[in-house]
């Protein structure tokens, strides 16, 4: 077991308390400046943002289209997306509740997924109800319901007005790939530029980037890539790009997440602030390239 000197524990605790305190007293603008400086070691340029992460912070503050709330609500987003691309791409919802105690598990199938509608981490998978840990699920989801995702995840404004709920969805599985590939399409005003695929997320998180012709890219975003672990090109890549294009139309930047399971495409979610605007690019020049594709001048027209 690795030993930590008491002074190191104290510094970790001091940093946590400082972050927590500032999170409650600072305005959105001041807090984003504080967080950006802490992550990147330089001042946040909001007057003339150039990089992808600078513009993500700018969008949090100034691109406040109320329609975005429903687009990121995991329950409401399904209606929005279905109206654009059709119900056949939507993962069926089995139920929606205000609290864990309201769930009637007798009415759910043997396999299902529970998640909160207002965040991105509160996911509970049930593969067998006989072995399902109900208490652990209750603790996790109840805690998530109480969390203000906007405040504690880098002031991601789009989540601010969502009323927290628990939803149940059908459990999707791919017999050929136990860890479902989540294809993340980086879109800029309805144009797909690159696609990100994460893998080994629970062991040694890796991330590969591909262009729209599915050529492996040598740049990285936050996590290392692996040329020896090339993800096969989805058979319906063109259709997936078409879906991402439609869902991102007239939006300065949004990431469209899709699944491709047993030759069928499913909508995952829409993400407006990739990594909360704090993920580093390697080499850094790519952060400027991605930033150049976000046109801020059209927002107030």
Image (cartoon, rainbow, N blue to C red):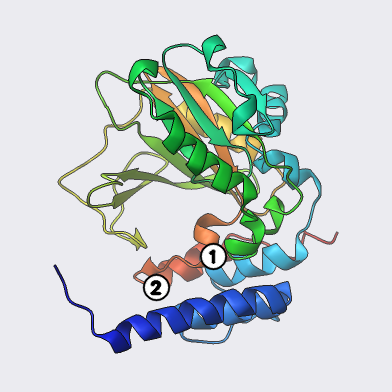
The residue lying furthest to the right in this view is 301
Which residue occupies the foreground of this view, 277 or 35?
Answer: 35
Looking at the rendered image, the quarter that the C terminus falls into is bottom right
Q: Which residue was labeled with disc 2?
A: 284
Q: Quadrant of residue 57?
A: bottom right
Q: Residue at x 59, y 81 (%)?
A: 34
Residue 293 on image: x %, y %: 58, 60
- On screen, residue 259 versus residue 58, left or right, reads left
Residue 271 on image: x %, y %: 58, 47
In the structure shown, which secondary structural element does the residue marked by tag 1 occupy?
A: helix
Residue 112 on image: x %, y %: 46, 20
Is residue 100 visible to us here?
yes
Mark 1 Cα within 10 Å, few/some/many (few <14, many 20+)? many
Look at the picture and state if 18 lies above or below 120. Answer: below
Look at the picture and state if 127 lies above or below 32. Answer: above
Residue 176 on image: x %, y %: 24, 21
Q: Nearer the viewer, mark 1 or mark 2?
A: 1
């Amino acid at each position: 077991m690795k030993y930590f000197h008491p002074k190191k524990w104290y510094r970790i605790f001091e940093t946590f308390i400082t972050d927590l305190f500032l999170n409650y007293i600072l305005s959105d603008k001041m807090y984003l400046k504080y967080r950006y400086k802490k992550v990147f070691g330089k001042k946040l340029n909001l007057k003339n943002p150039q990089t992808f992460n600078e513009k993500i912070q700018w969008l949090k503050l100034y691109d406040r289209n109320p329609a975005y709330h429903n687009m990121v609500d995991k329950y409401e987003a399904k209606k929005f997306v279905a109206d654009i691309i059709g119900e056949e791409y939507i993962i069926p919802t089995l139920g929606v509740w205000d609290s864990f105690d309201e769930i009637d598990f007798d009415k759910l199938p043997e396999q299902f997924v529970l998640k909160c509608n207002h965040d991105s981490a509160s996911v509970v998978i049930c593969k067998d109800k006989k072995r399902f840990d109900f208490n652990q699920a209750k603790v996790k989801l109840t805690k998530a319901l109480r969390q203000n995702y906007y405040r504690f995840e880098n002031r991601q404004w789009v989540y601010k007005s969502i009323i927290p709920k628990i939803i149940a969805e059908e459990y999707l599985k791919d017999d050929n790939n136990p860890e479902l590939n989540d294809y993340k399409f980086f879109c800029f005003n309805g144009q797909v530029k690159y696609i990100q695929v994460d893998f080994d997320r629970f062991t040694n998180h890796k991330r590969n980037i591909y262009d729209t012709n599915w050529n492996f890219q040598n740049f990285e975003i936050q996590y290392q890539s692996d040329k020896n672990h090339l993800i096969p090109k989805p058979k319906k890549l063109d259709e997936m790009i078409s879906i991402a294009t439609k869902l991102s139309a007239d939006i300065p930047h949004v990431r469209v997440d899709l699944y491709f399971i047993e030759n069928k495409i499913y909508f995952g979610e829409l993400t407006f602030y990739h990594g909360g605007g704090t993920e580093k690019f390697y080499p850094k020049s790519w952060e400027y390239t991605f930033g150049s594709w976000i046109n801020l001048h059209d927002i107030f027209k």
